[in-house]
Image: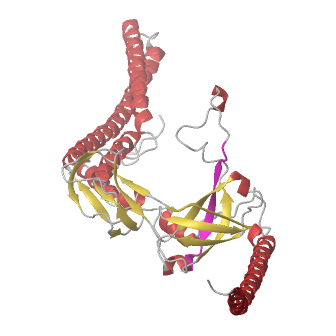
Amino acid sequence: MPHPPLLERLALLWSRIARPQERERGGRRSSLEEARSRRLRHLTVGFGALALGIFLYWLLWGRFWVATNDAYVSGNLVPLKAQVAGTVTEVRTDSTRYVRKGEVVVRLDGVKTKVALQRAEAELADAVRRVETLFRQAATLQSRVAAQEAVLSRIGSDLSRYRSVVREGAVSFQLVEDTEWQLREAEALLRDLVDQLGSVQARVRGTTISTNPEVLRAAALYRSAYLDHVRRNVVAPVSGYVAKRAVQPGDEVFPEKTLLLIIPLDYLWIEANYREVELTHVRPGQPVRITVDLYPRKILYHGLVEGIIPSAGNNLGLLPPENATGNYIHIVERVPVRIRIDPKELREHPLRPGLSCVTRIDTWRRGQPVLEPLTEIPPSAFRADYQTSVYDEEVELRGAAAEIQRIIDANRMPAGRPVRSGAP
């Protein structure tokens, strides 16, 4: 066994070798702890600054904005319907195609409408002939009344002479009595002729053939048939892009059937559905920032709150809630908000109805009272999308007046001018 002093010396040597390593390890441990503590302090300060920044952002900026992603682009969806029934013979457009106001989009067969037009023409011609006959009857009765008045005057004159010489024996009492009966017969016949003349004049008094009520009625029926014949060509009421075409050649269409949709893209707006708890400070006139999923986030639209729909979405649905039945569940309702889009930005980056978007309303602006919406239709959009002249009678009946006059002239008697009848 080694000598004990040698062991002690080895232990002492080992302690001298190990102590610097322990001291070095302790120094390293303390430096790591200090680094950790410094890192922890830095993180604490960073998180505190971040929390303070977020709080200040919310306090000074964020709390004045309300946002929702339950928002969609809306626009006018104009249904195209036929105004008369018929069979489709030609479809002149298709989905995604642009059509202009007044352009013929669908054609219907004109067999039934042409037959109806011919029937109306015949009825108008018959009415002209009947009225012409009435004017002739009135003229004939006027002549007969004048002749009967002359006969009555002659008989009355003869009766006066007979009565003046009957006592002298120049004429017999029988002749005087017969003349009196002739006078009564002539008066009765005159009254009958006057009544007949009054009956005819009641139908033609103060009119001509063209302005007689019977002819006007027949002319109105002709215009209706002419209008149906013209409207076999279905025209676009507004300009826009075709969508959802549901008509094919050979289809039987009726005025209630939608043939296709025409969507103008020059005037669109946003309908954003905000929760009712978010609408406390939303007012018309407040600015809105809009991002659409169709484009990158960097493309920003600027809008304006036009108004708040005067009902929550649940009341506008197909099945309104019936809370009185006992099936009541309290949920936060959503109310649609109408938002105007900047027309210039809309032209630069076109949109489509139904696209999803995110809207942010700046409620820091006071805006207008809720009951004073700013909703208005731009004049250009009103002329293009909210009114149409393709169905005006003056346009569609442009050739009817000439046809009616032609029918009247062709069915009048060649004797010349119509006879105007005065009061009896």
**Occupied quadrant, residue 15:** bottom right
Q: Could you tell whether 6 is left or right of 314 in the image?
A: right
Number of numbered labels in the structure image: 0
In magenta, the rendered stretch is: 331-344
Residue 335 falls within the magenta-colored stretch? yes
x 37%, y 10%: residue: 178
**Which one is nearer the viewer's eye here, 363 or 247?**
363
**Which one is nearer the viewer's eye here, 310 or 151?**
310
**Which one is nearer the viewer's eye here, 188 or 24?**
24
| Colour convention of the picture | secondary structure
Quarter the N terminus occupies: bottom right
**Which one is nearer the viewer's eye here, 374 or 116?**
374
Question: Residue 225: in sight, yes or no?
Answer: yes
Q: Position of residue 362 (x, y in %)?
A: 72, 70
Q: Position of residue 280 (x, y in %)?
A: 77, 57
Q: Position of residue 143 (x, y in %)?
A: 35, 35
Q: Could you tell whether 54 is left or right of 219 in the image?
A: right
Question: Residue 417: in sight, yes or no?
Answer: no
Q: Position of residue 65 (x, y in %)?
A: 72, 68
The vertical placement of 371 against 322, above or below, is below
x 24%, y 43%: residue: 116
Residue 258 falls within the magenta-colored stretch? no
The vertical placement of 169 against 378, above or below, is above
x 46%, y 15%: residue: 163
Q: Residue furthest top?
A: 174
**Occupied quadrant, residue 201:** top left
